[in-house]
Image (spheres, helix red, strand yellow):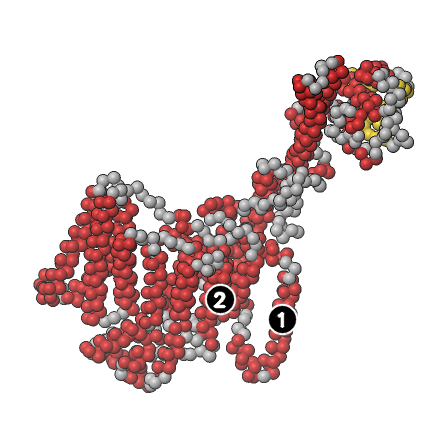
Amino acid sequence: MNPDRPLDGFRSIKVKLGILVALSIVAAALVSEAGSRAGVPAWLTMPVTVAVALAVTQWLARGMTSPLREMTAAASVMATGDYSSRVTTTSRDEVGELARAFNTMAADLSAADQQRRQLVATVSHELRTPLTAQQALLENLVDGVISPDSESLRTALAQAERLSALVSDLLDLSRVEGGVTPLTISRIDLAELIDQGVREANAAGADQRHIRFDVSVDPAEVEICADAGRLAQVIANLLDNAVRHSPVGGTVTVRGGAIDTQRWALEVFDEGPGIPADRAESVFTRFGSWNDSGGGTGLGLAIASWVCELHGGSISVLPADSGAHLRAVLPTVPSPASVPEPTKENSVPHASSAAVAEPPPARSSAPTPPAASPVAQLFGNAWPERNQKARPDLVLGCVGVGVLAALILPERNNIGLGALLVLFVCGGVVFAASVRKRAPWTMALALVSAGLGSLLVLRDADWLSVLAVLIVVVLTMSALTGARAVAATVLAAASWPVAALRGLPLLGRSISALSRHSIIWPVLRTVVISVAALVIFGGLFASGDAIFGSWADRIIPDVNADGFVYRSFVGFFVGGTVLAATYVAINPPPVNNAAMVSGKPVHRRFEWLVPLGLVIAIFGVFLAAQASAMWGGHDYVQRTTGLTYAEYVHQGFGQLVAVTFLTLVTVALAARKAPRVTANDRLLLNVSLGLLCVLALAVVGSALLRMYVYQEAYGFTVLRVLVIAFEFWMGLLLMFVLAAGIVRHGRWIPRGALLSAALFVLAIGLINPEAFVAQRNIDRYNETGKIDTHYLRRLGPDATPAIVAGLPPELAACIVSAPPNLSDDVLEWNLGRARAAAAAQGLDPNQTTGCASLLSDHS
């Protein structure tokens, strides 16, 4: 069985489709059931199950449709005039029958094209000689070099007659080959037909050369059934060939008669130089005469051969001691199958079955390029594949990453060095494969991504780790694709999961190339032998030495059936994810070509200026209200709204964040819709958007002030810190817009926004937000004696050192009631967790008694 085309043995395309669907469903069901039994979470089981089902479908469907792709590619090559392409015909279904018919057609076209080219070349050569001679003769007559006497005129006439004979022979041959004139079968007296041919030969010039004909027919009265006109052509051409090659005064022997009741023969002998054995077949092709010293067109024997074949007979050269011996064998009564009809199909000679099996190429040509796969046709120009070279090295690298992840990630409850190691290895494989790895933008994002990845070890906060990984994903896709616009960045992030489908053809070619590599089986044998040696000798040493056994227990994971399945899912998921990313790295999608469609600018200035002016006016009124609240103080706020100042500032913070975001949207829409035909248009747009951004910055300042006042009154939380950071970032974007208006160039804003967002997240992680929040609440406790102990207890280990250092021991012991336990596994080491464990060692576990009353007193 061919692994690339496993279903070739089935005779029906319907059966193949049924098997494809059934095997895909069975594979998906088995993978899903195995994951469920091993306790693999649904979010991990689902993508692996879908990937396995798609892989099975791709494997089977690729083999089913490969003949169609080959035929498409071969047809494209044939359209350029190269008919040497053939397709594989191992499939036994309807597609395989179509492939075999395609090969037959290609062989026929190749034979016809080869004959056409040969005919054009030889006809051009044969016509050139008499035309050149006739042209020279006529030029001499015109120039007076020779006189127009009877000899020169006879020479010109002879050359014209040679041209006429050549054209007539070509016309006859084309009619015979094309079946334009069907054979008219009638009863013919063979002796009379031969005598008529001899008389015509004498009239054509045999008498002038004193050629004698020795004719005999045995039996004397032989009647045959044939086309009299066509058979006369055979006799005339054979006699003409013998006369031309015989010496002056020579003898041409003609023998005719019945061989048996079914066949008769015509033999012609001459006394010429004869025909070499290696030219015995080529003399019956167009212009195949091996010796043109006797004159002639070189088509007579070809016409004789075709006429014999049309009657169901043959003609050949037989060995002779001297001269040439030609023999034609024809049926006494031609069979109906051998009589051609004047149809269009007969206009091209049909290739034999042997030609289909082993077609000689019409010309040397480049190999047929591989046809586009269905996946490539699905994506088309939206994501073309620029590099079709198989990459087994990337497949092996991703398999190695998957194995590493399967060994490290499962059965470790805490994020630490192991997760960072897997993340760095994944990033290294993707970066090494990238075609943009030398670009400054790619290098900058790689450095920022490495910093964000380090937060997995520096901090022990799951929410921060997830946020950092998500930002790394967006940075990676932006770096791999070179995205410049907002829409391009979104498409770049979406290209990662889409690459799992787009890269299937390349994955198939890479696996095929890998399976054909000569080193793959030695490597597999080496791996199997090495693993067996480790298991045998390692097991003996571990059972014989306690210290060695303890080391082995720490390094080697405890693998059971469910654990193996779980690790397989993890390895498959991580390896497949990295493989999809590497495809984006080596073949990035043209996301920058998919920028947002620019709408038509409005025709009238007031269409954009009036709405924008109203927004600016609303901003002005709002800032006036903020100024009155600031100048009027707490009493004015309470008298006007009935709220305390802290309640007042908290009430609208979320709305102000939304206003800042909508301001950025408004600026983008106004920049796209406002006309910029005149200098006044551009000036008015810049001033209006600049004023809006300045007012929005004032709103940002108001929002930040409100949050600061509120936190001073009610305490700090991680969420409030993140919201403040987000508002700061949007204020930075407004400053980017102002800077773009000043320099009149804003294409850098999307990249600047992405990089600044990543740096903000990195800064937040390095600041240690949970410790920062804990310290701010401790400072508030020291000033007011109030502290939200219930919130502090929900903080992670990153806040433990600040809590232990800033609060009384008995209160700190109650808040840090469950200090983290450090694992002996080095792959679970985490700086935040290690610092928390070290800080918690100073707490007395006995101090936790009475925590309920103590915590309620300080809440």
Write down the residue under mark 2: 425
Numbered mark located on residue 530 in the image: 1
The answer to whether 189 appears left or right of 375 in the picture is right
> Secondary structure under badge 1?
helix
Numbered mark located on residue 490 in the image: none
Disc on the earlier residue, 1 or 2:
2
The residues tagged by marks 1 and 2 sit, at their Cα atoms, a distance apart of 24 Å
Q: Residue at x 62, y 45 (%)?
A: 367
Q: Residue at x 33, y 72 (%)?
A: 768
Frontmost residue, 842 versus 689: 689
Frontmost residue, 604 versus 799: 604
Kind of residue indicated by mark 1: Ser
Residue 550, x across and y down, in percent: 53, 81
Q: Residue at x 68, y 17 (%)?
A: 144
Farthest-out residue, top: 150
Residue 664 in view in this figure = no
Residue 545, x across and y down, in percent: 58, 84
Frontmost residue, 776 versus 480: 480
Q: Residue at x 58, y 56 (%)?
A: 511
Kind of residue indicated by mark 2: Val
Residue 617 in view in this figure = yes
